[in-house]
């Protein structure tokens, strides 16, 4: 007879554990994603962050790997004088300088290298 109350409580205990288990949510914060290493110097890559005297060294680096250095330097310096910004690296990355990226030729091509 003494085991009877324990046997009656066992199903009740199991039901309670199941209810608690279905309502309990374990939330884990997502693991931080590794960021790619920043290999470009970021100063001077936001619109208006360069001084006019800083355009020449930035454009020299920007045009360092092209075969067409003279036109690259001409247009890079022209764009830098207008936008006060030169994208990092020797190619691409124009998203860092919207003015530099959005200035187009009459034909709709990119004006800035």
Image (cartoon, rainbow, N blue to C red):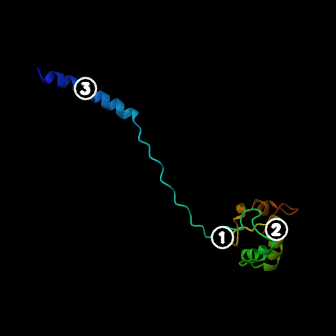
Q: Secondary structure at mark 1?
A: loop
User: Where is residue 54 shown, x and y percent of the image?
Assistant: 77, 74
User: Where is residue 51 shown, x and y percent of the image?
Assistant: 78, 70
Dividing the picture into quadrants, the one containing residue 9 is top left
| Towards the viewer: 108 or 28 | 28
Residues tagged 3 and 2 counted as in contact (Cβ below 8 A): no
Q: Which of the marked residues, 1 or 2, is nearer the chain's N terminus?
A: 1
Q: Which residue is mark 3?
A: 11
Spatial CA distance of label 1 from label 2 is 19 Å
Indicate whether 27 appears above or below 23: below
Quadrant in which the N terminus is drawn: top left
Quadrant in which the C terminus is drawn: bottom right
Picture disc at residue 41: 1
User: Where is residue 101 shown, x and y percent of the image?
Assistant: 77, 62
Indicate whether 39 appears above or below 95: below
Spatial CA distance of label 3 from label 2 is 78 Å
Picture disc at residue 79: 2
Residue that extends furthest to the top in the rendered view of this protein: 1
Q: Secondary structure at mark 3?
A: helix
């Amino acid at each position: 007879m003494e085991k009877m109350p324990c046997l009656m409580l066992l199903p009740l205990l199991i039901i309670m554990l199941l209810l608690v288990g279905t309502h309990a949510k374990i939330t884990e914060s997502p693991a931080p994603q590794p960021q790619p290493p920043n290999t470009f110097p970021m100063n001077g890559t936001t619109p208006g962050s360069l001084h006019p005297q800083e355009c020449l060294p930035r454009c020299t680096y920007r045009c360092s790997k092209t075969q067409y250095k003279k036109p690259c330097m001409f247009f890079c310096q022209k764009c830098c004088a207008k936008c006060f910004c030169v994208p990092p690296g020797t190619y691409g990355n124009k998203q860092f300088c919207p003015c530099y990226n959005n200035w187009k030729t009459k034909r709709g091509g990119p004006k800035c290298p």
